[in-house]
Image: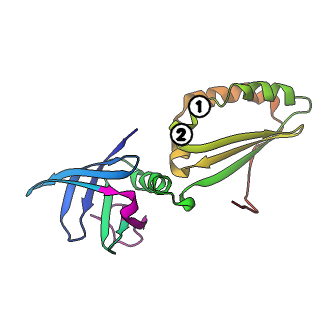
Amino acid sequence: MRITYAVTWEEPGGTRWSGRLELGADELRLEGSNGDGAASKELPYSDVNRFRLARSGEERLQGRPTLLLELRGGEMLKIAGVSQPGIVAELSDRLGVLTGDPKAVETAAIVVPLRPGSRAEVEKLLRNGPPFDPSKLGLVRHEVFVSEEEAIFVFQGLPSVFARRLAEDDSFWNAATEWRPLVRGRARFADSAYSWS
């Protein structure tokens, strides 16, 4: 599956182009134009040393949030979104997964306290899976652990994508009404205290 974004980018030499960025399985592709003509560029993820979000106004492209890609030769490619809020953060998250950067994938756990005797009903609701498509929400892994007293929802994936898309997903919020009679108290985030891989 290819994902496409409307972008402006600046080549290491300073030439700017407007067009689209496509994320493929092994490379990103830029296609666009400026007043001098058209351009097309294929960049394998293996040619990207590292990337980060621009921190200062000098690093930004036309004052917009900008993703900086440091290429193998040390040159910098700048990419800024066009008319899509949050595009640079989402693009950074997706690139992290596609390039195999383990820091890009975040894990969050939500602990939901359960009413006494509700475990069987909770497990019944969970048998059908979540009320959303995990891959469409930017998740790479999703698990739920259940005890007599609580359910622990573990989300692993692209944080900026997941949070935004979950907020827009009606099926998730509709399913929350089924859970209401089973929940005792407020859900809370659990912080990571130790991790090993």
- Could you say which quadrant of the image residue 187 lies in? top right
Which residue is at the far right?
A: 116
Give the x, y percent position of residue 68. 37, 66
Give the x, y percent position of residue 149. 88, 39
Residue receiving disc 1: 132
Residue receiving disc 2: 137
Identify the residue shown where x is 37% and y is 65%.
Answer: 69
- CB atoms of marks 1 and 2 within 8 Å: yes
User: Is residue 57 magenta-colored?
Assistant: yes
Q: Which residues are magenta?
A: 43-68
The answer to whether 101 appears left or right of 66 in the picture is: right
The quadrant the N terminus occupies is top left
User: Is residue 44 magenta-colored?
Assistant: yes
Identify the residue shown where x is 90% and y is 37%.
Answer: 148
Identify the residue shown where x is 51% and y is 40%.
Answer: 165
Q: CA distance from mark 1 to mark 2?
A: 8 Å
The secondary structure type at the circle numbered 2 is: helix
| Amino acid type indicated by mark 1 | Phe
- Could you say which quadrant of the image residue 166 lies in? top right
Above-or-below relation of 75 to 165: below
The secondary structure type at the circle numbered 1 is: loop
| Amino acid type indicated by mark 2 | Leu
- Residue 184's disc is none
N-terminal of the two: label 1 or label 2? Answer: 1
Identify the residue shown where x is 69% and y is 25%.
Answer: 128
